[in-house]
Image (tube, rainbow, N blue to C red):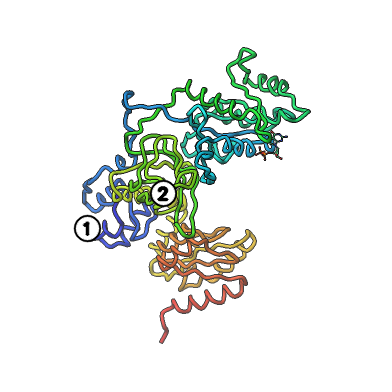
Amino acid sequence: ETIQVDELAKRMGVKVSDVIMKLMSLGVMATANQSIDYDVAAIVASEYGFEVEKKAVAEDLVQVSEEEEDEANLEPRPPVVTVMGHVDHGKTTLLDAIRHADVASKEAGGITQHIGAYQVTLPSGNTVVFLDTPGHEAFTQMRARGAQVTDIVVLVVAADDGVMAQTREAIDHAKAAGVPIIVAVNKIDKPEANPDRVKTELSELGLVPEEWGGDTIFVEVSAKKKIGIEDFLELLALQAEVMELKANPNRPARGHVIEARLDKGRGPVATLLVSKGTLHKGDAIVCGLHYGKVRAMINDRGKRIDEAGPSTPVEVQGLSGVPEPGAEFVVLPDEKKAREVAEYRQRKQREAELVKSQKMSLETMFQRLQEQEVKELNIVLKTDVQGSLEAMSDALRKLSTHDVKINLVRTGIGAISESDVLLASASDAIIVGFNVRPNAQAKALAEQEKVDIRFYDVIYHAIEEIKQAMVGLLEPEY
Ligand code: GDP
């Protein structure tokens, strides 16, 4: 549960600026219209002799905890596969060949859409889902965000090239994730192909073929000539069967974002992969930092659908923003709840960033209070390089006079960020940018917080203008 700073001040009958100062002394930088955590609010309130009552347990809401699944409700689900391997060993070509092997699309005569993942139906009736982005980078990025989407890794090794650097990397990543590997020995159509060499090299890395007494499935294919693709797919399905992959389709859906983008006409569009439950058109979801109602769902054949079960990739519209790949989505009872959770997460994230960014300003802020008889001009200074930072800092400090003190609340190199704006807002500072610009979010925040940003590319001009401002700060003399 959180409360806005001005609301807290109002309820206690205390000046907002006092509350902001108190917060700073606690190491929390927040402006009047930002929200603070229950714990922080409680500490501030206690200093004024108030007690804060907790209204709702927000953590419950945010965790959207995963409840135990009754074994009886589980049904088999298709495996989700990621293709990895060294560059040029044929990952993309293999993904294309697999797409062509899809019986369902042949029947429908449909062209598969690139939505980030696709489902393939085999002649045996089995289904396998492939993620469209090959390689271990995407795989690991998702995993870094806590999303374990892949059930099986297909390791592509060109029979004419053998094990290479990224082959080894792929093995490491798959092993780290605890995901079983199936080896596709590719390019066997080439005269110089030597599948046995691949087997020997991989055996040395712990991937021993079944026919050599190991437990790794090896399949020889030519992605280009489409040789061995169907056998390979059936072996994949077989491996999946051994794994007994299951999910309960009859529950509110949850799963992960495979990819997402902003579409000019349709707004935020995200490909979601359902891991359990069934996603319905009209469902309210929270998805990372965003929320929404599933307005439309499109499957990997570009067809509009109304529901998507476990291991089904779907492109959805209706989210409030573009989520990150790997973010989890969860269906909630209604949009209001989804919005609450998303907003809570956004606040959390902003606060985490704020805490990261502040720290240095505290002493200066208090010093400022103690020297209240002196008029001050607070400045956040950002420049392009160290040289200009030193030159500008020196020149600005030298402008301090007996009556007006120049106070550099922060100096730094690089673009003007949101945290610079927040700091300036909290300390009534102006921002001076020398050969730097704000990023889009910082610019928007500056407008919202009414923070003055001034840009210069000549030191002399900066000094002149700030001198003028200082004159304006002086009491008129009579
Ligand atoms: P990726 O970098 O792993 O995605 O590799 P690509 O799929 O882009 O393939 C690299 C090159 O190898 C391309 O020129 C493909 O046409 C070729 N290639 C892929 N599979 C085969 C194959 O089975 N046989 C032959 N001869 N060439 C292949």
Residue shown at 32% from the left, 28% from the top: 68
Quadrant position of residue 84: top right
Label disc, if present, on residue 57 of the rendered structure = none
Q: Residue furthest right?
A: 192
Secondary element type, mark 1: helix
Q: Is residue 368 left or right of residue 389?
A: left
Q: Earlier in the sequence, mark 1 or mark 2?
A: 1
Q: CA distance from mark 1 to mark 2?
A: 26 Å
The amino acid type, in three-letter code, at marker 1 is Arg
Nearer the observer, 358 or 99: 99
Q: Residues within 10 Å of mark 1 (few under 14, many from 20)?
A: few
In the rendered view, would you say 241 is above or below 360?
A: above
In the rendered view, would you say 278 is above or below 215?
A: below
Q: Which residue is mark 1?
A: 11
**Image quarter of the C terminus:** bottom left
Q: Is residue 144 visible?
A: yes
Residue shown at 68% from the left, 37% from the top: 87
Quadrant position of residue 383: bottom right
Residue 103 x/y as whole percent: 52, 35
Residue 382 x/y as whole percent: 55, 62
The amino acid type, in three-letter code, at marker 2 is Gln
Q: Residue furthest bottom?
A: 478
Q: Residue furthest top?
A: 213
Specify the quarter for ligand 1.
Answer: top right
Q: Is mark 1 within 8 Å of ligand 1?
A: no
Residue 212 x/y as whole percent: 64, 13
In the rendered view, would you say 339 is above or below 248?
A: below
Quadrant position of residue 184: top right
Nearer the observer, 440 or 245: 245
Q: Which residue is mark 2?
A: 349
> How many numbered marks are there?
2
Residue shown at 58% from the left, 58% from the top: 413
